[in-house]
Amino acid sequence: MEFLMNFYLHHALSILLIVPLLGALIIAFLPDKEPICRILSLIFSLDILLQAFLIIFSKFDPGLTALQYVENYRWFGDTIRIKLAVDGLSITMVLLMAILLPVTIIASEPIAKSKPKLYYSLLMILTTSVMGVFVAQDLFLFFLLWELELVPMYFLIAVWGGLNKEYAALKFLIYTFIAGACMFAAVLLLFFSSGANTFDMEVLSQYAKSLPHFYQMFCFVLFFLCFIIKLPSFPFHTWLPDAHVEAPTPISMLLAGILLKMGGYGIYRICVGFFPNILVELALWIAVLAVVNIIGAAVACLVQDDMKRVIAYSSISHMGFVLLGVASLTAAGFSGGIFQMFSHGLISAALFMLVGTLYERTHTRQISDYGGMTKYMPKCFYLFTLASMANLALPALSGFVGESLVFYGAFSSDFFGNFPTRFHFNFGQICVLFSALGVILTAGYMLWLLQRVFMGPENLKWSKLTDLRTSELVVLVSLLVLVILYGVYPVSLSELYEPSSTALVESVGKIIGKS
């Protein structure tokens, strides 16, 4: 038994990626019946969740900034290798994916009745690609796994989506393909200009810092464009509302819950880790971009009549806090941005699940079609209210923690003081003041959404609706309990990634100290 455990711990990350691929292969040979495929997928997803816990609680040391669970295998000679490893930042994202996968599979029961083998197989392949992005430490492997995510996601939208699914899937494909092209160009430029003859991210991160300024700037911009398209950020955000509206509920949960976080993870891992000099130069403009996202998307939420579009634009607004945290160049800002990614993954998944439960019963997402739903679906109302409170950053819920840390980091940033204004505030304080307007707008559109759907005159045509099923309650309660847990006791999450985020801040601090 001890031998097996030691073997597992030495190959934990490769097993983590192989298990969902094995699941996809087995499901492909099963009878094409939804319950069988779903149960087996759920077993594999629970195994992945168990593996994530084993990796964290067996010998992962959150106090270390060095890579852990390192696996390094030859692939194409010594130049391109399969190098896998985790630190606090990546293990946090792995944990988020591991939590979201089983609840997504449970939520898939009404969706996957058509072609269940294909649906659950694609879901398993998607899991491998997303998990792989978070644990890959070879830049070429990182790129390949990043691009692999396009294939299952395209078909999950195009086959099981809504009326305009082909348009939404193609738009998603085009935007994400352009993002991948930017990354590929940056990867090749970094590889050839460094002369390191390796794609090892640890090695390239050191070479990148010593490249001529022009090469650093060009690589940074290409990587940053790729990541803000995925995040997404203005002006590359328009693919997301269409993808969310047409995607089936479980895929919207994964799209908002984890796929957008690939963009944020890439900014921290590569833009910050490889090019701190350029980050310092462009921090002012990233902060402006963050404020535009926070306020602009929040305003867009106020004019939507489709519930999914409200939550989709809300996701764009909340990802603006990740950019603001990065732009602050402070420990609190970096920590808040990472916490925001994790927290938003849970909250957005719960909100999309709630919208999906209403749509499944009424076959409409138009807010104007609802009214007085509290009487007919009280459990849905209570959980929708809790998720909405978390989304508008009510204290004691996880949404409050990330946003407040970002605000504190930006407000207290000495770096922004280098940009004088006519007022008695530094630039970070001005960004916080404008971003705070986004918080007010979020409270406005979420409370207005609740009021229009669940309050007011009762719509008698919904009088025979049934409340949440047991499976739906399992999904929502699982997500919202974690939202409360991390809101009340945030250190249980932040202690995983803070040493890694602090190391990134210190590398940036050295640049600021020299300037």
Image (cartoon, rainbow, N blue to C red):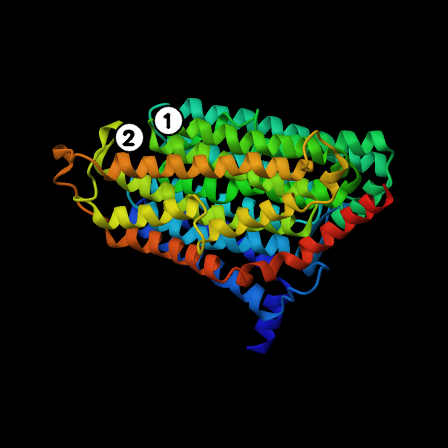
Q: Which amino acid does label 1 sit on?
A: Gln
Residue 27 lies, in percent from the top left, at 40, 49
Q: Which residue shows up at 71% across the image and 59% down it? A: 65
Determine if residue 479 is in view.
Answer: yes
**Left or right position of 40 against 191:** left
Q: Which residue shows up at 66% across the image and 39% down it? A: 428
**Is residue 245 shown above or below 344?**
above
> Callout 2: helix, strand or loop?
helix
How packed mark 2 is, by other alpha carbons closer than 10 Å (few <14, some 14-19, many 20 or more), is some
Q: Find residue 500 and name its label.
A: none
Quadrant in the rendering for residue 480: bottom left
How packed mark 1 is, by other alpha carbons closer than 10 Å (few <14, some 14-19, many 20 or more), is some
Q: Depth check: 5 or 88 in front? A: 88
Determine contact: label 2, label 1, CB under 8 Å. yes
**Is residue 289 shown above or below 454?**
above
Residue 251 lies, in percent from the top left, at 41, 39
Residue 244 lies, in percent from the top left, at 42, 32
Quadrant of image for the N terminus: bottom right
Q: Depth check: 185 or 216 in front? A: 216
Q: Which residue shows up at 33% across the image and 26% down it? A: 305
Q: What residue type is labelled 2?
A: Ile
**Left or right position of 277 against 85:** right
Give the residue at mark 1: 304
> Callout 1: helix, strand or loop?
loop
Give the residue at mark 2: 367
